[in-house]
Image (cartoon, rainbow, N blue to C red):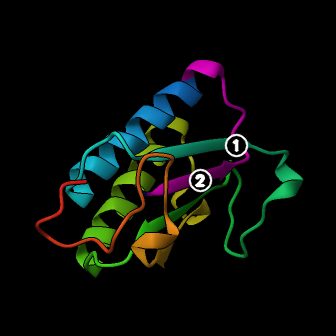
Amino acid sequence: MPLLQLDTTYDLTEQERRNCTKMLTQLYVEEMETTAGHVAVVVRSHPAESLSIGRAVDGPLAFLDADIRSGRSFEMKRSFGLAAMNYLHAEWDVPEPNLKVAFTEHPGEQLMGVDRVGGDWTPDDTT
């Protein structure tokens, strides 16, 4: 039951926001071995002075915070993180030094919807 929150200084159109939410969902499903029904995505655009990273070069910044259930391997998280950063670099021309992904892992019961409360993720889990 992940919550993926992207903050960027890229000036997004409505269509780019829609495309991004769809792509981040798709990448999460593929790389984290789950289904799309419970993946939540937020895309926020900010003025350039609102975000900073010490190594930044000229160009937009993009930071992805992924709140996920505990249990996934480093390799799965790294694969999703790289896929998301590659997408943002290719689609929005965000320079690689200006990209960052942070994972926060939660016990499953800390992530919930109206109809369910999550548990820790296991390799046999498809949701």
Determine the secondary structure under disc 2: strand
Q: Identify residue for label 1.
A: 44
Extent of the magenta region: 2-15
Quadrant, the N terminus: bottom left
Residue type for callout 2: Gln
Looking at the image, which residue is at 44% across and 55% down?
85
Looking at the image, which residue is at 49% across and 58% down?
112
Is residue 6 shown in magenta? yes
Task: Residue 16: give x, y in percent of width and height.
Answer: 56, 26
Q: Residue at the far left: name it.
A: 124
Residue type for callout 1: Arg
Q: Identify residue for label 2.
A: 5
Which mark sits nearer the N-terminus, 2 or 1? Answer: 2
Looking at the image, which residue is at 64% across and 20% down?
14
Using residue 125 as the reference point, say whether residue 17 is left or right of it.
right
Task: Residue 116: give x, y in percent of width and height.
Answer: 41, 53
Task: Residue 89: give x, y in percent of width and height.
Answer: 48, 47
- Nearer to me, 117 or 57: 117
Image-quadrant location for residue 92 = top right
Task: Residue 48: give x, y in percent of width and height.
Answer: 83, 49
Image position of 24 with respect to 97: above or below? above
Looking at the image, which residue is at 62% across and 42% down?
43
Image position of 77 with respect to 49: above or below? below
Using residue 11 as the reference point, say whether residue 105 is left or right of it.
left
> Do the residues under discs 2 and 1 have CB atoms within 8 angstroms?
yes
Determine the secondary structure under disc 1: strand
Distance, label 2 to label 1, CA atoms, is 8 Å
